[in-house]
Image (tube, rainbow, N blue to C red):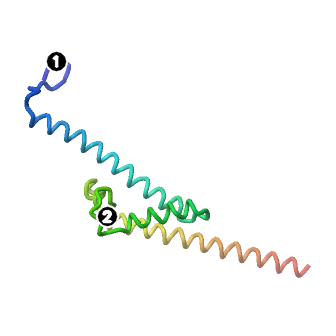
Amino acid sequence: MNNNGRILFDPSDIGLLEVLLKKDTREGEEGLMLAVLGDAIEYFQKYLLAKDEKGKKLFREAEEWILEKNSDWFFSFENICEVLRLHPDYIRQGLLCWKEAALKRRSSIKISSQAARIKISSQAARR
């Protein structure tokens, strides 16, 4: 190590160079994988209740990707979770519970608004 904190090494030491390059590549791959996972989770949550075709498609693709278990594709949900040291089934379960709760909230809001409209209509009819 020299005075400015940099590590000094023999540039002909191929093994050391490979380790350093692999670390940089791995960090880059992990960063990209984390971004892919983040986007999928964002689309899953943001577009669950989408009414337009683009939003529905984004949700469907994210959900299919998250639920796929038998893919050996490098950027599969399972592989990304493995590389990032995350438990894919735990994340799936959490997202599916979130989805179920969001759909129940939406359903109860629809029922409440329908009941309110019926109540208003019946009150208007009595007048």
Identify the disc placed on residue 88.
2
Q: Quadrant of residue 61?
A: bottom left
Q: Is residue 8 above or below residue 34?
A: above
Q: Position of residue 39 (x, y in %)?
A: 44, 53
**Element at label 1:** loop
**Nearest to the observer: residue 73 or residue 32:** 73
Q: Quadrant of the C terminus?
A: bottom right
Q: Is residue 57 above or below residue 36?
A: below
**The disc labelled 2 sits on which kind of residue?**
Pro
**Nearest to the observer: residue 53 or residue 101:** 53
**The disc labelled 1 sits on which kind of residue?**
Asn
Q: Is residue 31 above or below residue 13?
A: below
**Element at label 2:** helix
**Nearest to the observer: residue 45 or residue 75:** 75
Residue 3 as seen in the image, left or right of residue 79: left
Q: Quadrant of the N terminus?
A: top left
Q: Position of residue 116 (x, y in %)?
A: 74, 74
Identify residue for label 1: 3
Q: Are the residues flagged by discs 2 and 1 in contact, CB closer than 8 Å?
A: no
Q: Residue at x 82, y 77 (%)?
A: 121
Q: Residue at x 9, y 37 (%)?
A: 15
Q: Is residue 71 above or below residue 117?
A: above
